[in-house]
Amino acid sequence: MIEVKGLIKRFGLKNVLAGMNFSAIPGEFVVLLGPNGAGKTTFLRILSSLSRPTLGNVTVAGYSLPSQAAAVRMRLGVVSHMPLLYGDLTAEENLRFFSKMYNINGMDQRITEVLSLVGLSTRRKDMVRTFSRGMQQRLAIGRAVLHDPEVMLFDEPYTGLDQEASEMLDGVLQNVAAAGRTVVMTSHDLARAEDLGTRFDVLTKGRIGNSIHKNDLGGQNLLSYYKSVLSG
């Protein structure tokens, strides 16, 4: 579903990604870990066609980037720490706008389904500017899954959320993943990442330094594993 080989991304003379290899299969929830500046957001921007690789091969849902970016976008849902919604539109109007962009059939039914999925059915007629940060983030996920994408990318989706909002977002992410999509998420919240992910990759020095499946963590938690990788 995602296949990356020899990915290099340079900014000036600096290699942010230095020959990175990565793959993810359908139904896999990969959490991408790494210190600030490791290149996690840069990598997700390349996968989402917002940034072009300097060198290397990148394939998402069977399409190559950047040459087939339009086809990739139709099969991709992206959520960052910025909701990217229209504050002066209602939740329903936001989803209707994006539904038209994706030319979704049965638009009204799909909007109702998505609002239910993200727990905002009772707020569908309310202006998004009246929403809390957590509610806006849930609606952003609704926007991202409207067209039923095969691949979902989440870049630090918990940033700025309080405990209650984070717990609600947990449930939404679990529902998104349960649909069999391929999910790649960056997060500094290792406790939440451990609950959600099926695999954990550590990005250091522009490459995946270590990778482990949840079942192989054994007696250690994700934080201990992460610390051991960075100190090794």
Image (cartoon, rainbow, N blue to C red):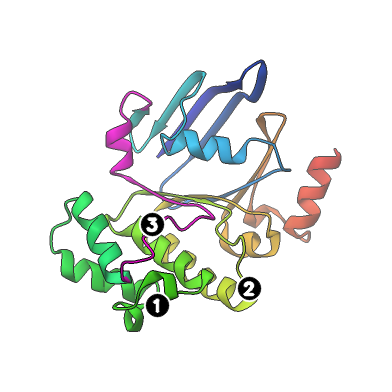
Q: Position of residue 71 (x, y in %)?
A: 27, 35
Classify 10 Å Cα crowding around label 1: few (below 14), some (14-19), many (20 and above). Answer: some
Is residue 229 positioned above or below 119 on the image?
above
Q: Which circle marks residue 180 in the picture? A: 3
Which quadrant does the C terminus fall into?
A: top right
Q: Position of residue 148 (x, y in %)?
A: 29, 56
Query: SS at mark 1?
Result: loop
Is residue 9 positioned above or below 105 on the image?
above
Q: Which circle marks residue 119 in the picture? A: 1
Q: Residues under labels 1 and 3: Cα distance? A: 20 Å
Closest to the observer: 77 or 4? 77
Is residue 158 positioned above or below 69 on the image?
below
Q: Amino acid at mark 2?
A: Asp
Q: Position of residue 197 (x, y in %)?
A: 57, 57
Q: Amino acid at mark 3?
A: Gly
- Decide whether the magenta segment is chiefly helix, strand or loop: loop
Closest to the observer: 38 or 30? 38
Q: Which of the two discs, 2 and 3, sits closer to the camera?
A: 2
Tell me which label, 2 or 3, sits earlier in the chain. 2
Proximity of marks 1 and 3: CB atoms separated by less than 8 Å: no
Tell me which label, 1 or 2, sits earlier in the chain. 1
Q: Which circle marks residue 162 in the picture? A: 2
Closest to the observer: 80 or 17? 80
Which quadrant does the N terminus fall into?
A: top left
Please name the residue shown 69% across and 36% down the image.
Answer: 38
Classify 10 Å Cα crowding around label 2: few (below 14), some (14-19), many (20 and above). Answer: few
Q: Dividing the picture into quarters, in which one does residue 140 lie?
A: bottom left
Classify 10 Å Cα crowding around label 3: few (below 14), some (14-19), many (20 and above). Answer: some
Q: Which circle marks residue 20 in the picture? A: none
Query: SS at mark 2?
Result: loop
Q: Amino acid at mark 1?
A: Gly
Give the extent of the magenta segment: 65-90
